């Protein structure tokens, strides 16, 4: 609730979110919000029910710079694995739903597009639906 109340207050969110994610050093001035040392633990926590709910909200309210850094450091090259998980798949759906540019959507598509059949077979149709909706919204790979 607090994060949603802060939505739009980028300066405050850039201070609060890294702390919630376990970052101790304040590197915001350099545009380095997520410490590399916390990334492996974040990837594990994304599979926990409570943390996955928190991350869904973090993705919803994150300023673009932080969102992009989260994608690059935490999610990139892990999307299919997270999509396969019972809790992680909801975080991936949130990530996809809040992606705001075509280049990012292309990267997401590259990881998940070829795995759509597997996602359906695992019962992860929500990930596929989010992917299709975002592609349509951002006009990326609509023909596929």
Image (spheres, rainbow, N blue to C red):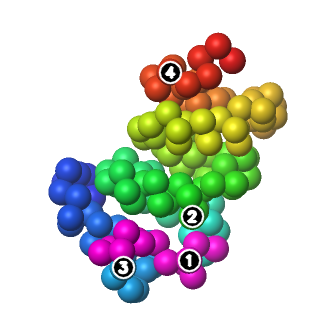
Q: What stretch is highlighted in magenta?
A: 28-40
Question: Toward the viewer: 103 or 60?
Answer: 103
Specify the quadrant that holds the N terminus: bottom left
Q: Is residue 16 left or right of residue 58?
A: left
Please, is residue 86 above or below residue 23 in the view?
above
How far apart marks 4 and 1 lie (CA) works out to: 32 Å
Question: Toward the viewer: 6 or 87?
Answer: 6
Local packing at callout 3 (Cα closer than 10 Å; few below 14, some 14-19, many 20+) is some
Residue 73 pos. (x, y %): 57, 64
Please, is residue 127 above or below residue 15 in the view?
above
**Callouts 4 and 1 close, C-beta under 8 Å:** no
Question: Toward the viewer: 40 or 47?
Answer: 40
- Write down the residue under mark 1: 36
Q: Earlier in the sequence, mark 3 or mark 1?
A: 3
Could you tell me which residue is drawn at 57 percent across and 82 percent down? Answer: 37
Question: Toward the viewer: 104 or 92?
Answer: 104
């Amino acid at each position: 609730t607090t994060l949603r109340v802060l939505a739009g207050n980028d300066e405050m969110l850039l201070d609060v979110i890294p702390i919630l994610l376990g970052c101790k050093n304040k590197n915001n001035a350099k545009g380095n919000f997520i410490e590399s040392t916390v990334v492996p633990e974040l990837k594990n926590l994304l599979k926990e029910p409570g943390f996955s709910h928190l991350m869904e909200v973090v993705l919803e309210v994150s300023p673009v710079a932080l969102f992009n850094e989260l994608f690059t450091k935490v999610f990139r090259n892990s999307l299919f694995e997270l999509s396969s998980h019972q809790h992680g798949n909801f975080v991936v759906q949130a990530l996809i739903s809040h992606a705001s540019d075509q280049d990012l959507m292309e990267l997401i598509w590259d990881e998940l597009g070829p795995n759509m059949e597997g996602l359906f077979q695992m019962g992860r149709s929500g990930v596929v639906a989010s992917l299709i909706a975002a592609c349509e919204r951002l006009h990326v790979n609509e023909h596929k």
